[in-house]
Amino acid sequence: MKIMWSAIATAAIVTLAVAAYWVDRRPSELAMAFAARVDENSARLVSLSELTSFPWEAVVFLGPYTSRETARSAMGFEWKDFETFDLEMSDSFSLAVFLKGNQVIKASKINRCRPDFGGELLAKQIPPSAAQFVIDRSSGCATFRAANQVVPKIATSEQAHAF
């Protein structure tokens, strides 16, 4: 009986690992929506709230080679799944990390230039009201820029507790 349960547990773990690998390799709905906006070839306003179908309080964009410490500082808490993305060693994608309170509710890989994110958007919490972008194509790589060029700073939980 013990051998049967062990075999079932092993099969379940292998199945979950294969499924996780496969799901991680598919482009997310958000990544596909971003790419569609880039492909539209227009400079119109892109509102992140229109591209998401779930509630969120802030988004943090993490560019290629972002360190765990930078991610922690931007989010205001330690994200235990950060290393599963291997962002510190990759230049092929960025991450869009959606937060609700002190919890990551969704993280999506966004391929480079599909779009990239302007420096003013990286490693900071952006509320839905400020998550409006224009597409800048001047560098030859589609880049989302803040539509209002001023992204309000949200105090992270660490900063709020410091006062």
Image: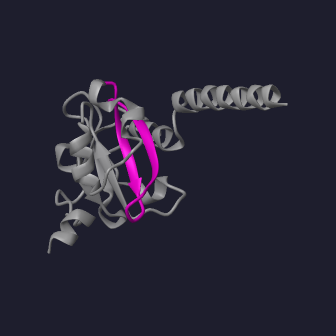
Quadrant of image for the N terminus: top right
Residue 160 falls in which quadrant of the image? bottom left
Q: Which region of the structure is painted magenta?
A: 91-112
Is residue 37 positioned above or below 160 on the image?
A: above
Would you say 2 lies left or right of 84 here? right
Image x and y of residue 125, in percent: 27, 57
Q: Is residue 101 in the magenta section?
A: yes
Is residue 57 positioned above or below 63 on the image?
A: below
Between 59 and 79, the residue placed more toward the observer is 79
Taking the spot 36% from the left edge, 48% from the top edge, the residue there is 79
Taking the spot 30% from the left edge, 55% from the top edge, the residue there is 77
Taking the spot 65% from the left edge, 30% from the top edge, the residue there is 13
Residue reaching furthest to the left: 163
Is residue 76 positioned above or below 11 on the image?
A: below
Taking the spot 55% from the left edge, 30% from the top edge, the residue there is 26
Residue 64 falls in which quadrant of the image? top left
